[in-house]
């Protein structure tokens, strides 16, 4: 029997609005809401108990730009609902500031890739609260808001992160992100079978069938699935996805 898998709605923030990009491109912005806290409440009322927030402005600029909006979202939803935040978090101060406003998990991306000392330091101080975002394009790591493709493979970097003590990674296939073309199951399987860490899958989710495909892989280390555009476009119903995965926390609340 495989472990339960969380469905984690994504809220991407740009200039204080809830948006989605296609493959991370700044010129592909679609605004879904001028009120991100209300959107967060919507997903929580539908059953979500963790939200995935990305500060897109921060990712492109290299430091947090929407922390105030993240704080408003934190205040708008129950404290029992977890929040993970990423985008431009490359300093100890940024990590501390987010944790101080009630964020549960901080996602390090470029900061983790470029500065291993920084990652090691944050793992020592906040181990359980640190998640590393592993973003890949054609099997290679991408950084700096997905604008730079590095020379190291995603599998090699994941193995390096495990050796450093990282407990959870978010694996995103960039070419599938925002495309509604289905997840890259082969790449997800390769990552999951190469490391012994919790893996949250992201990119390409379109329908319940995609959720089923990930579940059917039978990968015990895949603990979560992030979905954004499918929810906003209405091709995926979060309540149905939760029931499909029979996530225990939801059963306990009902």
Image (spheres, rainbow, N blue to C red):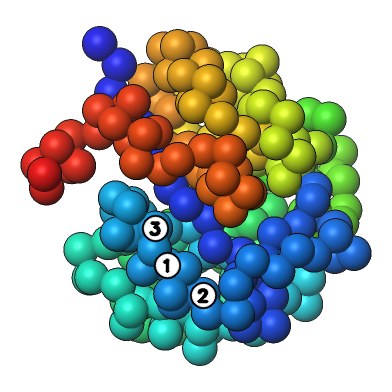
Q: Is residue 164 above or below residue 127?
A: above
Could you tell me residue 64's position as x and y percent? 62, 80
Residue matched to label 2: 36
Question: Residue lying farthest bottom?
Answer: 68
Confirm or deny contact between disc 2 and disc 1 (CB under 8 A).
yes
Q: For the residue labelled by badge 1, is the local secondary structure a helix, a strand or a loop? A: helix
Quadrant in the rendering for residue 172: top right
Name the residue tied to disc 3.
Answer: 43
Q: Nearer the viewer, residue 240 or 198?
A: 240
Circle 3 residues within 10 Å: few <14, some 14–19, many ≥20: many
Identify the residue under disc 1: 40
What is the number of callouts on the image? 3
Q: Do the residues bearing badges 3 and 1 touch, measured as CB atoms within 8 Å?
A: yes
Q: Nearer the viewer, residue 147 or 156?
A: 147
In this rendering, would 191 be left or right of 38? right
Q: Residue 203 has which mark? A: none
Q: In the picture, which quadrant includes the C terminus?
A: top left
Residue for point 39% across, 33% down: 241
Image: 183 above or below 137 = above
Position of residue 79 in the picture relative to residue 68 (left or right): left
Name which quarter of the figure residue 82 lies in: bottom left
């Amino acid at each position: 029997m495989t472990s339960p898998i969380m469905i984690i709605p994504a809220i991407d923030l740009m200039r204080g609005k809830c948006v989605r990009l296609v493959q991370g491109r700044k010129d592909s912005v679609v605004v879904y809401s001028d009120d991100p806290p209300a959107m967060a409440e919507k997903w929580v009322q539908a059953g979500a108990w963790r939200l995935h927030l990305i500060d897109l402005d921060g990712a492109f600029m290299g430091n947090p730009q929407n922390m105030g909006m993240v704080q408003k979202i934190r205040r708008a939803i129950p404290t029992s609902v977890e929040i993970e935040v990423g985008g431009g978090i490359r300093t100890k101060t940024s990590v501390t500031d987010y944790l101080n406003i009630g964020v549960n998990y901080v996602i390090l991306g470029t900061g983790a890739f470029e500065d291993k000392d920084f990652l090691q330091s944050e793992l020592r101080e906040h181990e359980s609260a640190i998640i590393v975002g592993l973003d890949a394009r054609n099997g290679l790591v991408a950084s700096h808001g997905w604008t730079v493709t590095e020379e190291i493979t995603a599998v090699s970097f994941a193995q390096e992160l495990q050796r450093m003590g990282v407990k959870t990674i978010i694996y995103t296939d960039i070419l599938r992100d925002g495309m509604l073309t289905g997840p890259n199951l082969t790449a997800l399987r390769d990552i999951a079978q190469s490391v012994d860490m919790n893996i949250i899958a992201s990119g390409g989710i379109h329908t319940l069938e995609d959720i089923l495909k990930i579940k059917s892989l039978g990968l015990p280390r895949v603990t979560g699935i992030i979905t954004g555009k499918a929810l906003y476009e209405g091709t995926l119903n979060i309540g149905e996805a939760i029931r499909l995965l029979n996530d225990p926390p939801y059963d306990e609340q009902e």
